[in-house]
Amino acid sequence: MPGIRVGHAHDAEALTGCTVVLCGDGTVAGVDQRGGAPGTRETDLLRPLHKVQKVHAVLLSGGSAFGLDAAGGVVRYLEERGIGYDTQVAKVPIVPAAIIFDLHVGKVDVRPDAAMGYAACQAASDEPPAEGNVGAGMGATVGQLLGPAGAVKSGIGTASTDLGGGAVVGAIIVVNPFGDVIDPATGKILAGTRPAKVGPIHVGGEGPFIDTLEAMKGRIGRTALRLASKGNSVIGVVATDADLTKEEANKVAQMAHNGIARAVRPAHTMHDGDTIFALSTGRKKVDVSVVGAYAAEVVTQSIVRAVMAAEKAGGVPAVSDL
């Protein structure tokens, strides 16, 4: 998409990383955050009734709240190139960010920092982004009901579609949910909680996955919920070359969350910090409802691609290993 570049940086041994979406000299943006465990930066300014209209980059990062430090490297990269909101005394880069919790895999004391954020910017290009175990998806997992012992490796995925008239909408999504990733057409679990031991009790049947939604109602599931990590999220960016206002960009971000609800079961729980940013490069005239509807579609496709592209890491198996 003209005006949009994506870059990954990661530590394959520590199993964490970050992904940056660079927006040139500024792009109209919106955000919608759902779920009870968010980790974000500079999201309030994206909402209607606030002064700033454009952002210069969006950062997606691992490392939990520590990973927000990587935004400092993105800010430095942009400042060095004279890109930012003009305050008359300095140009201040606007870099919203969201994080996933990946501290339970790899090395807990290694997190994305300013150097890694800067490296992601240096790696940015307008080529199709890599998927799976890269960038912010390096430490992502799916299916956390029984903790890391029952999780499946996930990652980052992308998808795009034609909106007609030459306009497009695309998504890049980091998939690290508490729930299961399902095939939206059939409801079949593609990646989720594997049978595992909870104390002395082995939970699960003969299949490769436990139905997290169903298990949550049972005694073991209720116990697991009390002990479960509050750090899970699906985070990402949808971008379009449709011409949107800031209010319309926020609406697209809101509608894009429907894509999470179609592919993740359950979604938007108190254990998730699901956050979607929307970017508009403002070149084509397309009805905002069309953009939002197809934004949800590409989010769904990106989620499925993320789990299918992931590879085993840190002792956590991928879908291809099961």
Image (cartoon, helix red, strand yellow):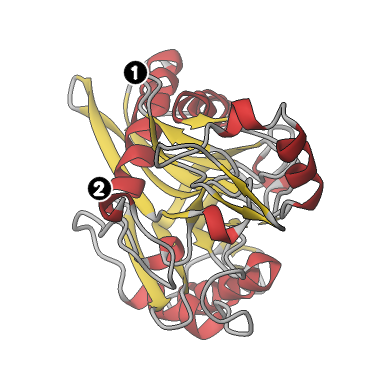
Quadrant position of residue 268 = top right
Who comes first in sequence, dot 1 or dot 2?
A: 2
The x and y percentages for residue 170 are 32, 38
Is residue 41 visible to us here?
no
**Position of 59 relative to 66 (above/below):** above
Q: Amino acid at mark 2?
A: Pro
Q: In the figure, is residue 156 to the left or right of 275? A: left
Residue at 60% of width from left, 28% of height from top?
213
Position of residue 276 measured from the top left corner of the image (x, y, whole percent): 54, 40
Regarding mark 1 in the picture, which secondary structure is present there? loop
Name the mark on residue 54. none
Seen in the picture, residue 123 relative to 53 is either above or below; the reply is below
Is 63 drawn above or below residue 300 in the view shown?
below
Q: Which residue is mark 2?
A: 2
Q: How many marks?
A: 2
Labelled disc at residue 186: 1
Q: Is residue 214 visible?
A: yes
* Identity of the residue drawn at 33% across and 21% down: 285
